[in-house]
């Protein structure tokens, strides 16, 4: 089996840009294994397809605006995508485009600084912000959108 076996055409106008409100009105595709029939309905109806013993897992994760831009001391722009919060000010990040090395200090708007404290691998350093970064993300961060959007 190859991953290309799962490729399919998805028209851009069918890709949701924002969640449906109310959320239970979102579309639901039901595949009936016994007959091969495909049925289109809404999530509101999911209870009619569940049987005793079925497990329904609800994903309530929220995407944070984790893409920010910093400046090197030379003035060059660096894109940072925050991946994993290790503590109040320390994050594992993905650096887009330009390489940064341990010991470098990057500068954000509003006077915040970002110290590169370790190179984990490739373009994933561990960084320490001069203060907790969550409020900055709410003001200046951008949503990390997948390439197909």
Image (tube, rainbow, N blue to C red):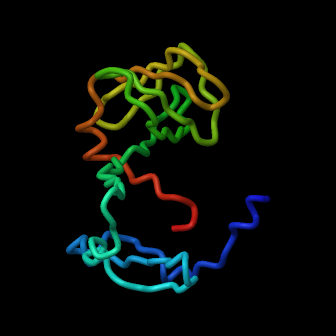
Q: Residue 136's spot in the image, x, y percent? A: 28, 38
Q: Report the number of discs.
A: 0
Q: Residue at x 33, y 68 (%)?
A: 50
Closer-to-camera residue (134/70)? 134
Quadrant including the N terminus: bottom right
Q: Residue at x 60, y 26 (%)?
A: 100
* Outermost residue, left side: 22
Asked if residue 23 is positioned above or below residue 40 in the image, the reply reads above
Give the quarter of the image for residue 8: bottom right
Asked if residue 83 is positioned above or below residue 32 in the image, the reply reads above
Closer-to-camera residue (98/53)? 53
Q: Is 108 situated left or right of 78 in this image?
A: left
* Outermost residue, right side: 1
Q: Residue 13's spot in the image, x, y percent? A: 49, 83
Closer-to-camera residue (132/3)? 3
Q: Residue 26's spot in the image, x, y percent? A: 32, 76
Q: Residue 42's spot in the image, x, y percent? A: 32, 80
Q: Is 129 situated left or right of 45 in this image?
A: right
Give the quarter of the image for residue 99: top right
Asked if residue 104 is positioned above or below residue 42 in the image, the reply reads above
Q: Residue at x 53, y 86 (%)?
A: 37
Asked if residue 60 is positioned above or below residue 14 in the image, the reply reads above
Q: Residue at x 45, y 52 (%)?
A: 144
């Amino acid at each position: 089996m190859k991953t290309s076996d799962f490729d399919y055409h998805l028209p851009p106008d069918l890709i949701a840009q924002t969640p449906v409100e109310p959320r239970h009105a979102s579309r639901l595709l039901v595949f009936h294994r016994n007959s091969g029939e495909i049925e289109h309905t809404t999530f509101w109806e999911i209870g009619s397809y569940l049987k005793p013993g079925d497990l329904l897992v609800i994903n309530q994760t929220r995407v944070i605006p984790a893409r920010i831009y910093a400046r090197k001391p030379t003035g060059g722009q660096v894109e940072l995508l925050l991946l994993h919060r290790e503590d109040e000010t320390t994050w594992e990040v993905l650096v887009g485009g330009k390489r940064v090395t341990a010991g470098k200090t990057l500068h954000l708007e509003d006077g915040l600084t970002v110290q590169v404290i370790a190179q984990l691998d490739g373009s994933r350093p561990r960084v320490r912000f001069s203060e907790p970064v969550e409020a900055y993300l709410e003001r200046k961060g951008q949503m990390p959108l997948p390439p197909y959007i």
